[in-house]
Every structure is written in structure tokens, then in C-alpha cells.
Amino acid sequence: MAGKLSPSVMCADLLNLSSEIEKLDRLGVEYLHIDFMDNKFVPNITFDTNMVKCMKKPMKNIRRDIHIMAFEPEQFFDKMDIGEGDMVSVHLEACNDAHAVLKDIKDRGADPCLAISPDTPVDSVLDYLDEVKAILLMTVYPGFAGQPMAPKSMERLSALKKLIVKSGKDIEIEVDGHVSWDHCSEMREKGADIFVAGSSSVYGKDYELEEAVRKFYGLVE
Ligand code: DX5
Ligand code: ZN
């Protein structure tokens, strides 16, 4: 199966979001990566819950891939209208009870995913493999686009893939942060399934969006 693309909407043309989402939908892109930040878990704010909710409106086939970089993420689920078709990542480092939060996401009909930041040991996810659709491996320190890759990210990706294969469970790996033109093929080889593409690739200055999307799929097939 080919790699899936999840362009990071915080890197898109924020003054033309609806047409940006429609363009990606027409191009057959699987996900729209929506970074939600609380200015506490990470020192930044991107979209409010109403914007996250509204981004669903122009969507036909593309799905919301909501990455919640916030403490007690469950407090936002209602306002974001989390439901069928959504993929929702919450940070292990930000949950009081990640088991309960992942169950809440599942009970709403969405796909639960667990995100870990670069300093969190990969084997921290072992307790949750029965409860997730995917693991979101942060390959930058969360909070900002345009950062360099965090140290040991490729080794961590290989270790995570090995741990999931050993578990025998059908769990995808999403990589998020500096998924650049130079890195995405190697990430695919090391086991990444879903690629958050931001300023270092699809929303970079080198290509028009349509050409960038086509190029990306060619690199991660
Ligand atoms: C960082 C965000 C990423 C970021 C990716 O916290 O989660 O989605 O926008 O963009 P680049 O490719 O610039 O790292
Ligand atoms: Zn993200």
C-alpha cells in the first residue's frame, strides 16, 4: 500500500482555507493535518475549536487528521465536533489518563491515535497498542512549522516500526515535522505510513501545490 499524505494546514494559505481544502480534496489527498495548540503544552496557538470544526464543511473525501497539542485534550472534542471519519491524535505527555481519552475518541466514531514528542521513549506506547489506529511520531519538537528534524528521529522511527511489527497489530505510523523532500523516502523505507507535509515539502516554495502533491506521492509509494 502506498504512503498517505496529510498536508499541514497551518502551513497553507490561511486567508483562503476553504479553496485550499477543496484543492487537496480534488487531488485525492487522504488527510488534512490540523494542528491545534493551547499555548500551554506548546508555546503557540494556531486555530480555535470553531475553525477546526468549520474545516469539515468543504470536505468531500479528504478527512480531518487533528493533532491536538494541548493538555487534557478531551475538553475540546465536543467543540471540534469530533466524529466518524476523523483521525485524532492526542499527546501521551498531555493526558491525565490516555486510556480514557483514546476510548472517548473511539466512542465518538473517530480513529484514536497516540502522539509522542521527541524526548518520550518509543516504548512508552506499548501499553496503548490495543487502543490506537496509529502512532504519531513527532520528528520535530511540537509547536512550530519550519523546524529542523529532532535528533535520532530516524532511529526512533525504525524502533517504533519494529515494536509494532513485533506486536502483530495493524497500526500505522504517522510522521510529523520536517518531513522534507530529502527525508520522506527514507521515512517510508523505515516504516512511515502517513506523512505530515508542511513547509519543508508540499507547502514549500519550490513547487505549486498540485505538482508538490504528485511529487510527494512518487517519493513515498
Ligand atoms: C509542528 C506541526 C507540524 C508542522 C509540519 O508542531 O505539528 O505539522 O506544521 O511542518 P514542517 O514541514 O514545516 O515541519
Ligand atoms: Zn502536527
Image: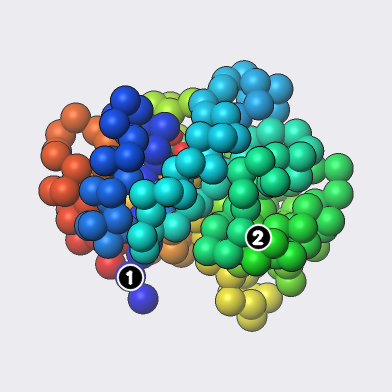
Residue 51's disc number: none
Q: Amino acid at mark 1?
A: Ala
Image marks 2 and 1: residues in contact by CB distance under 8 Å: no
Whether the residue carrying mark 1 lies under 8 Å from ligand 1 is answered with no
Of the pair 194 and 111, the residue shown nearer to us: 111
Label disc, if present, on residue 112 of the rendered structure = 2
Q: Residue at x 15, y 34 (%)?
A: 206
Vertical comparison of 211 with 218: above or below: above
Nearer to the camera, 144 or 17: 17
| SS type, badge 1 | loop
Q: Quadrant of the C terminus?
A: bottom left
x and y percent of residue 21 in the render?
32, 45
Residue type (three-letter) at the residue carrying disc 2: Pro
Specify which label sits upstream in the sequence, 2 or 1.
1
Figure check: 45 above or below 191: above
Residue at image location 23% in from the left, 57% down from the top:
26
Q: Residue 87's quadrant in the figure?
A: bottom right
Q: Is residue 189 left or right of residue 66?
A: left
Q: Nearer the viewer, mark 2 or mark 1?
A: 2
